[in-house]
Image (cartoon, rainbow, N blue to C red):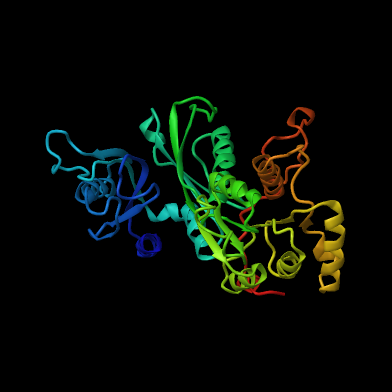
Amino acid sequence: MNDVLEALQREWAAGRTAALATVVRTFDSAPCPTGTMMLVSSSGGAVGSVSGGCVEAAVYEQALECINGAGPVLARYGVSDGDAFAVGLTCGGTIEVFVQALAPEQSAVLGKALSAIEARVPAGMATVVEHPDPGCLGQNMVILPGGTYGSLGSRRLDQTTADDALGLVAAGRSGTLAYGLEGERLEAGLSVFVRTFAPQPRLLVFGATDFASALARLGSFLGYRVTVCDARPVFTTPERFPDADEVVISRPHVYYQDQLEAGAVDRRTVVCVLTHDPRFDAPLLAAVLNGAKVAYVGAMGSRRTHHHRIERLLEAGVSPAALKALRSPIGLDLGARTPEETAVSIAAEFIGEAWGGSGAPLRLMNERIHHKDRLPLAAPSPSEHSPS
């Protein structure tokens, strides 16, 4: 991806128009994921791939046509039943590729996304890829933590897309969204593809318990990259946590400190401490609360456990101000009993923390459903990777 974007910047810097081809939908065994890009320059060069070689030639020709004045196009490529070795995907999949020319003057809007990527700030680029009016195809809007740039054609469509795109960016996912012609949800009339430039946020679950297993499953469903960590090998196995991306056997505070120093913890990271053991959770929470800012840190336990935990953390040198970030006992009051219900209460709390939600029933509120005052998109500065 970086090679494609760097090539686009070089083309713009030289005053040249280039064509960008992006995979916006995949079906069956498509060789490349949604969001994969290929750039074709006006001189005929190409950077990147949209299919690993299956349909590159056809996409390349379409890109040259766009550079030479043809409008944006959404093309579908797949296997032909009559000839699997014709232009198509011999792997058996089908992809839809949106191809559009990007002239240097479009850098005023799209350059915002490129600058954000260079600064390691999560960003999204929304593009109209299907519309009954061909003149509306290819309209772009960039979504950043500080606002949006450009327009997709109407204020309502811009607002609806921005709300949904922020969720995709926060999860590190790209996808195609369908709306009515004025941005109405639950209607179909146009399609907007949102290409996100952000890694998945991390969910660090400490403690190899049944609660951790349920939370790992829910965290994966929500789009997090899930790590389960515990010092006990007999309990900390991939078989017990099939939904986790990583299962790590380590003393929790040692693993967390290593991740912090490696720059693998940022402001979107969620930390859930489910160990129930002060030997593990006290040094771990001290490392989290004294380290870089994270999106959420919560610890499981009774109110009595919480009070003892606070005493230990104060003795360990954690300041009263830093302790305000700790959510303990963890989760919202849902009356949860089972591990699965408890996982929902925990996830509900860190989702609310991320987006500025109050946790109150929506039926009792009159304000906007989608909060805009707090966005979980800020990237850390290099200094924030090191403990304070």
Residue 306's quadrant in the figure?
Answer: bottom right
Image quadrant in which the C terminus is located: bottom right
Q: Is 300 situated above or below 120?
A: above
Q: For this view, does 266 lie left or right of residue 176? A: right
Q: Nearer the viewer, residue 176 or 203?
A: 203
The residue sitting at the front extreme is 234
The residue sitting at the top extreme is 187
Image quadrant in which the N terminus is located: bottom left
- Asked if residue 58 shows in the view, the reply is yes
Q: For this view, does 75 lie left or right of residue 10? A: left
Residue 130's quadrant in the figure?
Answer: top left
Identify which residue is drawn at 20% across, 39% down: 79
Position in image of residue 227 (x %, y %):
56, 58
Q: For this view, does 27 lie left or right of residue 295? A: left
Identify which residue is drawn at 52% across, 28% down: 182
- Asked if residue 116 shows in the view, the reply is no
Q: For this view, does 238 lie left or right of residue 145? A: left
Q: Nearer the viewer, residue 168 or 297?
A: 297
Residue 90's quadrant in the figure?
Answer: top left
Position in image of residue 76 (x %, y %):
28, 38
Position in image of residue 387 (x %, y %):
68, 74
Q: Nearer the viewer, residue 149 or 47?
A: 47
Position in image of residue 208 (x %, y %):
62, 57
Q: Is 24 situated above or below 41?
A: above
Q: Is 367 situated above or below 220?
A: above
What is the count of numbered marks? 0
